[in-house]
Image (cartoon, grey):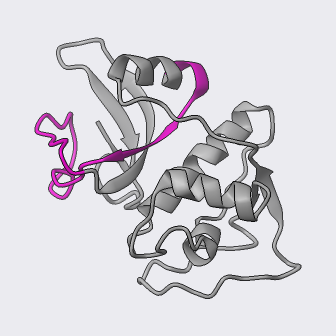
Amino acid sequence: CGSCWAFSAIGNIESQWQRAGHKLVSLSEQQLVSCDHMDSGCNGGLMLQAFEWLLRHMYGVVFTEKSYPYTSGNGDVAECLNSSKLVPGAQIDGYVMIPSNETVMAARLAENGPIAIAVDASSFMSYQSGVLTSCAGDALNHGVLLVGYNKTGGVPYWVIKNSWGEDWGEKGYIR
């Protein structure tokens, strides 16, 4: 299922919710995959449109993962749930666009925490560990969560959380 965009957006919201002083809560990617008709479910989407959909159609409310679990791992997209059993887990009131400038991104990351970004993931397929040094940048085709960076040592690098599970890369992360 091509739902990386939902994992990127929800990961950003989870971290911002906690940074705002709330309890860390696991939020529902499935809510976006099944309900956000501004995007295309398992056929892809954009984090910006996910934030817009939440604000326009859900008043910023994101349901908990526990009440709306992820079920699209096999590529099937379930119908959007409309149930009284869905539990609000967080609420957003906006988003900030950050320019594609490494200095600005590093400063915002250090100041505000994880950032939902798009990358060219063509070199991710064979990644196992270490610092990836052969990264293309032309075709943005994958949503991830930028969670850190390191400028010490020989090669500066970003730390990215991917949505492909803990068996991929360095327990689900790439440097």
In the image, 13 versus 70, the foreground residue is 13
Quarter of the picture containing the C terminus is top left
- Above-or-below relation of 151 to 145: above
Residue 6 percent location from the top left of the image: 52, 61
Q: Is residue 170 magenta?
A: no
In percent of the image, x 50 and y 25: which residue is there? 109
Residue 71: where, in percent of width, then height? 55, 80
Place of residue 24 in the rendered image (x, y in percent of width and height, measured from the top left)? 72, 44
Residue 73, horizontal then vertical, whole percent? 45, 77
Q: Residue at x 27, y 26 (%)?
A: 157
Q: Which of the image's four quarters has the N terminus?
A: bottom left
Q: Where 119 falls versus 158 (above or below)?
A: below
The magenta span reads: 110-139
Q: Residue at x 78, y 82 (%)?
A: 82
> Can you see residue 83?
yes
Which residue does the image show at 23% across and 12% down from the upper left?
153
Q: Left or right: 159 with respect to 87?
A: left
